Image (cartoon, helix red, strand yellow):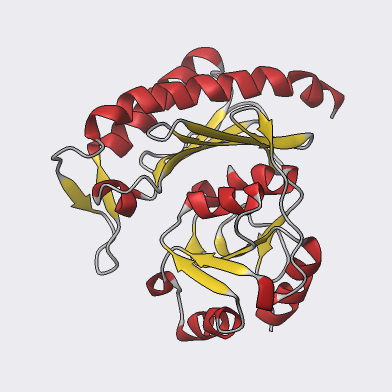
Amino acid sequence: MAARNDRIEEFRAFAGRLADAAAVAIQPYFRASLDVENKGGARYDPVTEGDRAAERAMRALIRRHYPDHGILGEEEESFAGAGEYTWVLDPIDGTRAFITGLPLWGTLIALNDGTRPVLGVMNQPFTGERYEGMASGAWRNGVRLRTRPCAGLAEARVMCTSPQLFDTPQELAAFQAIAAEAQLVRYGGDCYAYCMVASGFVDVVIESGLKPYDTQALIPILEGAGGRMTSWEGGSAQHGGAVIACGDPALHDRLVARLSR
């Protein structure tokens, strides 16, 4: 583990280079006329050339500088590296927001050490915001982030990208029962919602149907800011699925106890 810690700042700087490269690739496509492809069949799952161009740019940099590292990305086939590290990439998390001109999207970059994600970046080039997280903390543009205390749901601000994305009626009902007790409920945040939890403006995000590239970059940001992000059963969120993120660890434990039933 000491060797990993010695290199974390090196990897953090490189993740910034990946974010910069993705931003340059994406810029011509945001709020521009572009073709949108549905890759999800009956459940609409849009992808654009901006997604593909950004992932190609990041993959090229990784292959050039860390050819033994694996790559797991949303738009291309995974590559199993010879070493322990894997970069997990979502070039545009929030493509629905992207194609409707809303800035609630971001590029997600995680580094997994073979056990868990140890470094996470969410970059929003349009607003000029970069969120970073690792074991020693979390930052927005270099300013340290902290989640806020939240005693209970009556004081909680709860977010979810869309109630349409829950996989089963039972999952939707479980979310709605919690949302009904919340102070405030908002939709449409994608990765941005999790960064708002880390920033102390939102208390809870509850979602389902996520993939590893949706969650891995956000886990170090949430945890570095003092929050928790797990599966509904309280296990690792790095594999996606049904996920809950909370700024207050005590509230997180109470909600996991409800959702796991």
Placement of 99 over or under 119, stated as above or below? below
Residue at the (32%, 52%) spot, across then down:
97
Task: Quadrant for the C terminus, please.
Answer: bottom right
Kindly identify the residue that appears in the image at 54 percent across and 23 percent down. Answer: 16
Residue under the image location 53 percent in, 18 percent down = 67
Can residue 145 be seen from the camera position used here?
yes
Please give left or right for residue 111 compared with residue 210 in the image. Answer: right
Q: Is residue 179 left or right of residue 83?
A: left
Taking the image as shown, residue 85 lies to the left or right of residue 80, namely right
**Residue lying at 45% horizontally and 73% vertically, measured from the top left:** 166
Give the image location of residue 72, x and y in percent: 49, 39
Q: Is residue 131 above or below residue 234?
A: above
Which residue is farthest right?
Answer: 2
- The number of numbered discs placed on residues in the rendered structure image is 0
Q: Which part of the image, by quadrant, shows the N terminus?
A: top right
| Location of residue 100 with respect to 221 vertically, above or below | below
| 62 sits left or right of 229 in the view | left
State the image coordinates of residue 125 (x, y, percent, origin top left).
41, 31
Please say whether residue 111 is visible from this viewpoint.
no
Q: Is residue 107 above or below residue 178?
A: above
The x and y percentages for residue 139 are 66, 34
